[in-house]
Amino acid sequence: APAMEADDPPLLPLGCVADCPARIDANGYMIGSIESESYALSWVQPSVSDLDEDIQQYSQVVISTETRRLLIGLGEFVYITPSKTGRPAEIGKIETLFDAGADEDNAMMCTVRWLYRKEHVKGGAARSMHQREVLYSTHVNENLVESIEWKVNVLLHQDAATAGHLLDQPHTFFCHKTYTARAKKIGSMLPPPQTPLAEVADEQPAEAAPAAAPAESIFAVPYAPPIPTVAAPVVATPVVAPPAPMAASDPVPTSASAPVPCATAQTPAASVAAGDNSTRPSSTPC
């Protein structure tokens, strides 16, 4: 951040969720005027982009007014100014922060993933939603940073029962379902990935690493577990004793004598594959 001059007023302490402006009530409804108050925006330096790129991206931005100062970072949930007073403040997740470049007058922009409230959903699904419930949607678009009102708490992977007394706190919501905006369908949210501890993982037998989860892994998709590999049964090879050497006095077999037995033939591979793990001699003489 730029250095302060000697005559600059002291910086106000950074606000938190509890410091939300009074024009938004505890349940996230805009009860005051939607007119913007005077503010100042500043990127937290340095940029996370290469300096020669036209559009510079940042990880944090500071929003300052005459009475409060707010630090917003990537991945945080925020209120966005609604269309009119009396409407619920929109709730979104900040996915990118960027300077739009000289062609757009260096507008300070953010990419927002919208969390749908019950007022945004039609039909019976809306009637069954809790007042503090939000749906993690596929709807993402760009907005001006100045449209951000304040921070908000969103408890992911929790329903009303598991959130419990936390919902008594103002500006706190829960989310355990997803919403596909185009198809207008509600789905189940995948649980967060489980990362084993390094020391525990080192003690386990080496296994193939699982496939990487898609970026949008919070949306449930049908999961097909890998088919376990079953080793083919081991077929024991019988040991056949070699015939005893013939003495000089032993008669030489003639065509009328019984044939000398062949070495035992093994079960064909097809029999092993079919589950037959016995060893059967061939019925065909040599």
Image: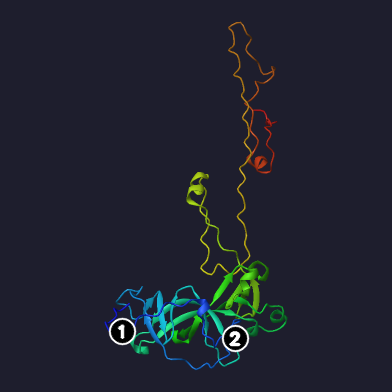
> What amino acid is found at the position of numbered circle 2 in the picture?
Tyr
Q: Which mark is residue 29?
A: 2
Q: Which one is nearer the viewer's eye here, 259 or 201?
A: 201
Residue at left offset 35%, top offset 81%: 10
Left or right, 12 with reference to 263: left
Residue 266, position as x, y percentages in the image: 63, 33
Residue at left offset 45%, top offset 74%: 74
Q: Which one is nearer the viewer's eye here, 229 or 134?
A: 134
Residue 71, position as x, y percentages in the image: 43, 77
Residue 189, position as x, y percentages in the image: 61, 69
**Label 1 CA crowd tier, 10 Å (few <14, some 14–19, many 20+):** few
Q: In which quadrant of the rendered view does residue 273 lie?
A: top right
Q: In which quadrant of the rendered view does residue 217 lie?
A: bottom right
Q: Which corner quadrant holds the N terminus?
A: bottom left
Select label 1 or label 2 by which is in front: 1
Q: Earlier in the sequence, mark 1 or mark 2?
A: 1
Is residue 151 something that shows in the picture?
Answer: no
Tag 1 secondary structure: loop
Tag 2 secondary structure: loop
Is residue 122 something that shows in the picture?
Answer: yes
Q: Which mark is residue 8?
A: 1
Q: Which corner quadrant holds the C terminus?
A: top right
95 is higher (above) or lower (below) than 278: below
Residue 226, position as x, y percentages in the image: 60, 55
**Label 2 CA crowd tier, 10 Å (few <14, some 14–19, many 20+):** some
How many badges with numbers are in the image? Answer: 2
Colour logic: rainbow
